[in-house]
Structures are given as structure tokens and as C-alpha cells.
Amino acid sequence: MKPKVYITREVPSPGIELIREHCDVVLHEREEPPDHIEIVRNIQDKDALLCFVTDRIDKDVISAGAVLKVISTYSVGFEHIDVVEATKRGIYIGYTPGVLTEATADCTFALLLNAARRTAEADRFVRRFDWTISWSPTMFLGESVWESTIGIIGLGKIGRAVAKRAKGFNMKILYNDVTRLSPQEEKELDIKFRSFDALLRESDFVSVHVPFTKETHHLMDEKNLRLMKPSAILINTSRGPTVDGAALVKALKEKWIAGAGLDVYEKEPIEKDNPLLQLDNVVLLPHIGSATREARAKMAELAAFNLLAVLRGEPPPHWLNPEVENIRPLSEVKML
């Protein structure tokens, strides 16, 4: 009998094709995500689950999956999964780090440049037919990126990729991370460590690249936003709740900072009454940091490889909870 797999939404090729070669697949075919009740109902007889960051895989889902052996998430983030409960029940968890690094770093710099040079605002200006003077020395003045200072909060893979792009703009690169690099590494990357407060005070651009945890919830709150320069711009392509949305609206309205570029929000999709929508000094994207054809295809492939590896009794290429093998060895979950 083939393993049974529930996939909560269509993924780019070759993800589903790889899984269908070896498993019986039940696919949620609509573009919008399944609701929690649907996930609970569909998981009950499934050996494996391929899910997304928008799916809440909590204790109720995990409990309903009586024969569940592996959860493969099509994401780097994993706060949507109750990892402790899954591990306790001997369920392996795979995720997709690395493959979206360059795409997200590209998106970060796209937001930075757009927010600095006000290009999204200028585009709307042209489309409204408000452009009535051919040229003006004060039209859409923005902030210079060349030879400015960028402060990177969180120097993981994406943070480092952003730093490499910043070098192309001859930027001074500051960073803050829970673990400081060695002097040799800092020299090789041409970056300088700063305390969190000092980084906020010195940077012209502050780019957030931390995972979402209890410690990073509202990391950029009112107190820390007030430390930034009035000419500074905040960029967030990490997780929405790392920035206090209400405090950011206040900062943008009252000009504590010059602008912001956001790909993520505390609540997604963004609410229709969110004050950010009424502000010109913020660039808003719909969570598309990894949205290149190449990155999304690689994510799909890796998510499939993680899932199939466990069903073959092999360690997944990228797994969150290797300690689960002490609870249920791979030999006990092997089906292929």
C-alpha cells in the first residue's frame, strides 16, 4: 500500500510530481488555504503532510494525525507548527532553508531602493496623471543609498546575502546578532558589529532578518523606532510580528523615521483598514520575498525530498527535530 499524503495547496513543479510517483496524494486545489477544520479532517488517515506557513499545525492537527509520520513545510519559518508536540509524538519535521536566501535578499534590496527613492509613490503619481510639470529640482526627493550605512539585524544566510549586495553600493555595513563573528570573519565580510541600540542610531537603513520567537516579538517597538534617525528607513522581510505595527504607523506619521519597506505584517493578508495603506512613505508588498520561479521550484523540490526521505527511512535533507529519532527511529516510519 502506498503512503497517503495530504498537501494543503498546489506547489510549483516538481514538488507534487515527485511525491505522486510514490504516494497517494490528496490535494487542496483552491488557491486560498484550507481552514483548520479541513486540515484536521484530511489528516486523520495520512502518513505525511506537506503544509505552508499559512497553515496552523497545532496540537489538534497533530493529534488527529493518528498515523502521521512526517510534516514537511514549504517554508523556512516554522512558528506555525507545534514542534514540541510533533516531536513528542515521534513525527519528523522538514523545512526549506537556504534555497530562498538569494530571492529574499533581492526582495530586501528592492524594498530598500524603492523606499529610498520613492519609486512606488512616483509610479502612482504618474498613473494618476498628476505629473503636470516636466521636471522640478524638488520633485520626489528621496534618500541616497550609495555610500550610506546599513544596519542588518540578524546575520544569518539572508542577512549575509543582503550584506553582499550592500557592498555593491559601497555602503558601510553594521550588524547585530546574538552571536558575534570572529574578527577574521568580520574583516573578510567587511562588516562591523554594533550593539543593538548603536546600530539603530547609526544606520540610514535598518534591515530585519531574525526568526520569529518570543524574544523577537515586537523587536522594533516604539522605544527602538525612536532610536532611529529621522532620515532612516526600516526594511522588514523577516516575520511581520517582529515589528510593532501600531508603533510603526505612529513613527511614519510623526516622522520619527523617513520611511519603511515591508513584505510581512502582523496579520496577513493586511486588513483593509490598516493605516499603513493610507501612508505614502511606506512600500508594501504581499509577502513575496521568495517569489522567484527558481526559488519556489527549489522549495517545492526540497519539501518533497524531506517528506519522501522520511518515508524511505532516511534522514531528511533539512529537518528541524533530529532528536525525534530517539522517540521513533527512522526504521519504524519506513514505508517505501
Image (cartoon, rainbow, N blue to C red):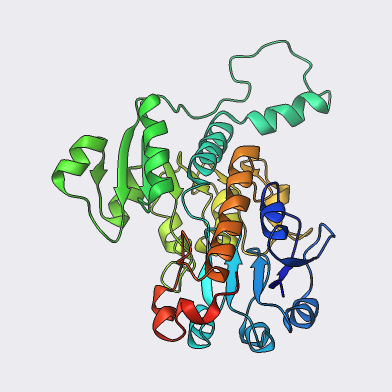
Residue 265's quadrant in the figure?
bottom right
x then y, percent, for residue 279: 68, 46
- Nearer to me, 15 or 221: 15
x then y, percent, for residue 144: 46, 26
Residue 196 higher or lower than 230, as above or below: below
Residue 87 higher or lower than 264, as above or below: below
- Residue 105 appears left or right of 249: left
- Nearer to me, 318 or 215: 318
x then y, percent, for residue 114: 59, 33
Residue 260 higher or lower than 63, as above or below: above
Q: Residue shown at 54%/59% (left/top)? A: 239
Q: Residue shown at 49%/82% (left/top)? A: 87
Q: How many numbered discs? A: 0
- Nearer to me, 199 or 291: 291
Q: Residue shown at 82%/57% (left/top)? A: 31
Q: Please, which residue is most extreme toward the left here?
A: 183
Q: Is residue 334 visible?
A: yes
Residue 26's quadrant in the figure?
bottom right
Q: Residue shown at 61%/31% (left/top)? A: 118
Instruction: Quarter of the image for the C terminus: give it.
Output: bottom right
